[in-house]
Image (spheres, grey):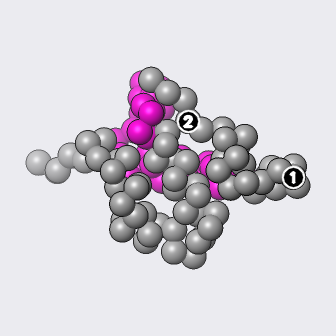
Amino acid sequence: MADWPGPTELKQVLDIESSDWDETVDRVLSAAIRKVKSDVGVWDDDTDEPDDNLAQAALRMAELISLRPSTAVFDASSDPTYQRLMSGHRKRFAIA
């Protein structure tokens, strides 16, 4: 199992060297992780852990949010990288 990506990793992806953006990076990363958990569907913070693909999907979502904040959620549905990373991880259950 992997861990969720941290702010340092996102700063590397976004090529941010200044600490002036730390608060924003934390906020974006938190939103991205919440989005991935939501897209999985049924997520229990006490028992579920991200694997490498989910951790990378969160990093990709954070990148999308950072670069195109007004369309990030819509871009995720058509972003092939995000979709590949999420493949096989969705746990949605129909109401019986």
Q: Where is residue 89, by image quadrant?
A: top left
Q: How many marks?
A: 2
Image coordinates for residue 41, horizontal then vertical, percent: 34, 47
Q: Residue at x 11, y 48 (%)?
A: 96
Residue 91 makes an appearance in the image: no
- For the view shown, which residue lies furthest in the bottom direction? 70
Q: Secondary structure at mark 1?
A: loop
Q: Secondary structure at mark 2?
A: loop
Q: Residue at x 47, y 67 (%)?
A: 73
Camera-nearest label, 2 or 1: 1
Q: Residue at x 49, y 27 (%)?
A: 2
Image coordinates for residue 16, horizontal then vertical, percent: 77, 54
Please provide the residue range marked out in magenta: 25-54
Q: Is residue 41 magenta?
A: yes
First of labels 2, 1 by sequence position: 2
Magenta portion: prevailing SS class:
helix
Q: Work out whether residue 46 or residue 20 is closer to the camera in this orientation and state it.
A: 20
Q: Is residue 36 magenta?
A: yes
Residue pointed to by mark 2: 4
Residue 69 makes an appearance in the image: yes
User: Relative to 20, is 62 on the left or the right?
Assistant: left
Which label belongs to residue 77?
A: none
Q: Amino acid at mark 1?
A: Ser
Q: Where is residue 51, by image quadrant?
A: top left
Quick one: quadrant of the N terminus? top left
Residue pointed to by mark 1: 18
Badge 1: residue crowd in 10 Å (few <14, some 14–19, many ≥20): few
Q: Residue at x 51, y 74 (%)?
A: 71
Badge 2: residue crowd in 10 Å (few <14, some 14–19, many ≥20): some
User: Relative to 32, is 10 on the left or the right?
Assistant: right
